[in-house]
Amino acid sequence: MHFAVTWDYRCPFARNFHEHLLAALEQGAPWEVDFVPFSLLEVHLDEGDPSVILDTARRNDILALTTGMVVRDAHPEQFPSVHRALFAARHDEARDLTDPEVIADALASCGLDADAVLAQARSDGLAAQLHEEHHRAVERYQVFGVPTVIFDDGRAAFVRLMNRPGGDGELARRTLEAVLAITQDHPELNELKFTTLAR
């Protein structure tokens, strides 16, 4: 099965889903997955506001996303560890992902040359690529948030998982198999949301 999943490091639900996804893939889940960057800052602009992504004065606001893109495309073998490290910096360590030093620490902890990756991530070309990937998701699939799973038949589903896999690859795989089964096998289901949560 092939599908794509959006991410923004700002979102804790994206962190939960992507931790499940990475653990399931490492467990041997037979999925081909494309990772699609999506800017929550961009999608929440008021009509007529200039693009956050293309504003050179706000380059640090998108630096974590463009860093993830550089690693995804140029260092795919390190992408899972960097992806986890950037989510952890934001959500486990409460660090500021607009600070290049925080991103550099995450890159270095995964064995990458932080200066080289950040130089690419700051480029106009990466900003333009992020703008294109983000807006394609919005225009083609009506994506409004993260994580959204995008299927090859053109359907897309926004999914919120409340738990983290805690390194349990089998749990992660079972969880995502259930999510994928519901979204693939029941196209008539448009929305399901619990009004209360078990704690």
Image: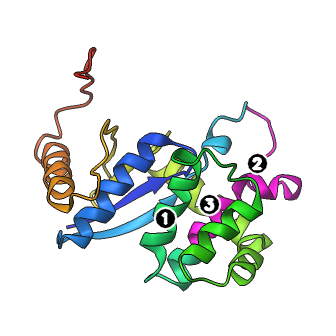
- Residue underneath mark 1: 83
Which residue position holds label 2?
52
Is label 2 in a helix, a strand or a loop? loop
The image's mark for residue 65 is 3
Question: Could you give the CA–CA distance between mark 2 and mark 3, rounded to whole angstroms?
Answer: 12 Å
As measured in the structure, the alpha-carbon distance from the residue carrying label 2 to the one carrying label 1 is 22 Å
Q: Is residue 35 left or right of residue 161?
A: right
Res 162 quadrant in image: top left
Residue at 70% x, 56% y is 62
- Which amino acid, mark 3? Leu
Marks 3/1: CA–CA distance:
10 Å
Per the rendering, the mark at residue 176 is: none
| Residue range of the region highlighted in magenta in the rendering | 47-69
For label 2, the crowd category at 10 Å Cα-Cα, with few meaning under 14, some 14 to 19 and many 20 or more, is many
Q: Is residue 166 left or right of residue 113?
A: left
Residue 136 in sight in this render: no
Q: Quadrant of the C terminus?
A: top left
Q: Nearer the viewer, residue 22 or 7?
A: 22
CB atoms at circles 3 and 1 under 8 Å apart? Answer: no
The residue drawn where x is 75% and y is 64% is 101
**Amino acid type for the residue under numbered disc 2:** Val
Left or right: where 1 falls relative to 44:
left
- List x then y, in percent, for residue 90: 58, 49
